[in-house]
């Protein structure tokens, strides 16, 4: 088995959209994004199980959040500036509408929502949260902003009957062993 990596992520892999899609541009429908996401989930789950699938999607979200921060957010030390930038770019890109419900940075705790979430808004009720990719994405964004790892957990989801996705975020250094 070869250890050579063929798909190590680089921002360059996003390509030159103007050159490659001169007629279609940089947009597609949400159904196509979800088709890709949920077929990946299904095949990975069939091969590795649900728990490992969630771990993979969390890790992918974390890598995406780190790269997204590097390429889409201007570095700042100000929480309000960071949140304003993030709200604007997430909305402009059609990813979702971010709101901060609670933020206590001295305690390293936040509660935030993402409405019209690209991953799940409009899906049927399943009885469980599905936004593990978003958990990783948000975790990496917060770590990139603060320099401190964050544990992010979805507590409300469209798929549990809520009409927004709600996440708690806690600085990992402040968690007890049971919380991690």
Image (tube, rainbow, N blue to C red):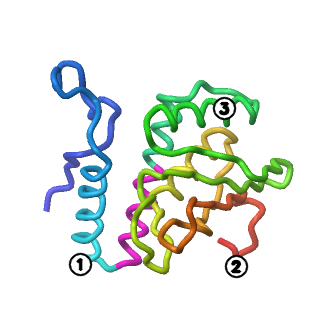
- Give the CA distance from mark 2 to mark 1: 30 Å
**In the image, 97: left or right of 29?**
right
The answer to whether residue 141 is above or below residue 59 is above
Q: Which mark is residue 178?
A: 2
User: Looking at the rendering, which quadrant does residue 44 occupy?
Assistant: bottom left
Quarter holding the C terminus is bottom right
Quarter holding the N terminus is bottom left
The residue labelled by disc 3 is 84
**Do tag 3 and tag 1 residues touch (Cβ < 8 Å)?**
no
What residue is rendered at 68% in x and 48% in y?
148
What residue is rendered at 71% in x and 48% in y?
100
Q: Which element is circle 3 on?
A: helix
| Residue 139 pos. (x, y %) | 58, 53
The residue labelled by disc 1 is 46
Q: Which residues are magenta?
A: 50-62
**In the image, 120: left or right of 10?**
right
Label 1 neighbourhood size at 10 Å, few (<14), some (14-19), many (20+)? few
Q: Which element is circle 1 on?
A: helix
- Give the CA distance from mark 2 to mark 3: 33 Å
């Amino acid at each position: 088995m070869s250890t050579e990596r063929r798909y190590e992520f680089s921002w360059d892999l996003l390509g030159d959209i103007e050159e490659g899609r001169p007629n279609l541009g940089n947009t597609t429908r949400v159904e196509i994004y979800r088709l890709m996401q949920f077929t990946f989930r299904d095949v990975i789950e069939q091969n590795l199980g649900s728990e490992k699938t969630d771990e993979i999607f969390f890790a992918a979200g974390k890598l995406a959040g780190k790269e997204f921060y590097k390429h889409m957010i201007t570095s700042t030390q100000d929480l309000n500036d960071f949140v304003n930038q993030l709200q604007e770019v997430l909305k402009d890109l059609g990813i979702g509408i971010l709101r901060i419900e609670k933020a206590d940075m001295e305690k390293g705790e936040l509660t935030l929502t993402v409405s019209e979430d690209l991953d799940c808004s409009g899906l049927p009720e399943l009885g469980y949260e599905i936004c593990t990719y978003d958990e990783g994405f948000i975790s990496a964004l917060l770590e990139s902003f603060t320099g401190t790892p964050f544990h992010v957990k979805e507590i409300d989801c469209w798929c549990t009957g809520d009409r927004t996705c709600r996440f708690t975020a806690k600085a990992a250094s402040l968690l007890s062993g049971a919380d991690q």
